[in-house]
Image (spheres, rainbow, N blue to C red):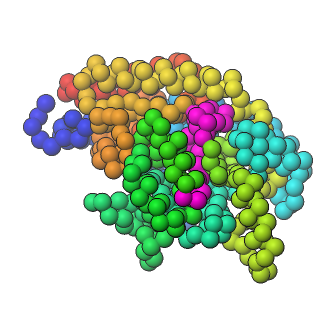
Amino acid sequence: MTNDAQIGGVALSRIRSLYETEVERYTAARPRAQASAAEGSHGYYGGVPMHWMLDWPMPFPMIVQRAHGATLEDIDGNELADFCLGDTGSMFGHSPAPVARAITDQAARGLTYMLPTQATHAVGKLLQERFGLPHWQIATTATDANRFALRLARAVTGRSKILVMNGCYHGSVDETFVQLHHGQSINRLGLMGQFVDLTAQSKVVEFNDLAGLEQALEARDVACVITEPALTNCCMVLPDPGYHEQLRQLTRNTGTLLLIDETHTISTGPGGYTRAHGLQPDIFVLGKPVAGGLPASVWGFTDAIAAGWDELRHAKDAGYSGIGTTLSANALTLAAMQATLSEVMTDEAYAHMESLAGQLCDGLARVIARTGLPWHAVRCGARVEFICAPGPLRNGTEAQNAHGTDLERALHLGLVNRGCMIAPFHNMMLVCPATSKAQVDRLIAAFSELAQWLVTH
């Protein structure tokens, strides 16, 4: 190995060589997509409908022709085993049959009415049974659900501040965009158009830091702690043993509400990490896959919060609450959500996902051990990551430092060229009910080939 700078134990020169080789291979396999990129997609900034679509590691975006189950095909006829699954939006596979039927049936009867349907009532009962909380509301995205839940938490507690974990991601909720920088709270680096000091009303501590949490809550000015059960939208960080029990006790001792955002950790089981590990949140949020791929989210809360909301609604002046959007809880979404909750998110589906995810994580770990790379693999239910740094990681700062953008870009593109697609923003892989053992074996083999190349060339 050369003596130049390294990322993840690999020389930069070697990483660049791999990426250049993979760019050539990708380009040769996608002439139609390249021609489309050269012509430009008129009407869109950067040629894409959402700017983050430019963040994929490809030299130009592939264009999807169709997707079904755990397989995706682009317009050039390349078929990929899909372990990204819409970054959790299609966590239960592309177009599950029960969801497709429900959408087709409801589409013939109307898409949105601003009124409940029979599916609405069925979903309410399913949410109570599955996640345990008695009161539920529907939103369009997890961002919306988190934003609405935090507004309500502040209203019922009479407190203005919230607390987040360093390195967290809860959608584009303004007050969650704070971070620790050399031990000081600052606005999240990279924000655009941010003209308010978010640290005035948001506190931030490290995940797994109970002493820091206790200190941040002791002033009793925090309305709500919002956290994932495990940090996932960075290099994955799992909770220390006993962390969640102490988190719950500290919040209760200080009159602080606890919001658990399960948008990614729903990979843990049919009731999410919350049910699997006996967590007791005051508020529960789930977005992305809950309607089988349609834009939808849910947020639930306790009787005590509902009573506080009742009191506020009766006392407040007429006017907008700041909670709700016109297309939330539309008929099409609720039909898809009923099918997803009752027919797709089953115990049997999760058993399959858990088994194959375990095999995937073990296989990646064996490759890492065999090549001697200073990396590790980690799993949260059906969600697996390889991290190009030693582990395990314990907090957001360690997760941030574990990122190796150039190395990850080369690996991601190499996997795509070998017929496997993972999430573009980090090294996340999901196993869905339609994923096969052959696809898992294919991903392990592709990862092994790339890792071996990095240590031998």
> What x and y, as percent, mark residue 30?
45, 39
Looking at the image, how many numbered discs can be counted on the residues?
A: 0
> What x and y, as percent, mark residue 33?
48, 45
- Front residue (pair 436, 140): 140
Query: The N terminus is located in which quarter?
Result: top left
Q: Classify 359 as above or below 97.
A: above
Q: Give the range drawn in magenta.
A: 254-279
**Magenta includes 261?**
yes
Q: Can residue 30 be seen in this view?
A: no
- Identity of the residue drawn at 55% across and 54% down: 253
- Identity of the residue drawn at 41% across and 20% down: 363
Query: The C terminus is located in which quarter?
Result: top left
Q: Classify 31 as above or below 311.
A: above
**Magenta includes 299?**
no
Quadrant position of residue 450: top left
- Identity of the residue drawn at 71% across and 59% down: 305
Task: Tell which residue pokes out farthest to the left in this image.
Answer: 3
- Identity of the residue drawn at 63% across and 63% down: 153
> What x and y, as percent, mark residue 399?
36, 45
- Front residue (pair 32, 227): 227
Q: Answer with left or right where residue 227 lies relative to residue 278.
A: left
Q: Answer with left or right where residue 228 lies relative to residue 153.
A: left
- Front residue (pair 249, 56): 249
> What x and y, as percent, mark residue 126?
79, 40
Q: Can residue 156 be seen in this view?
A: yes
Quadrant position of residue 279: top right
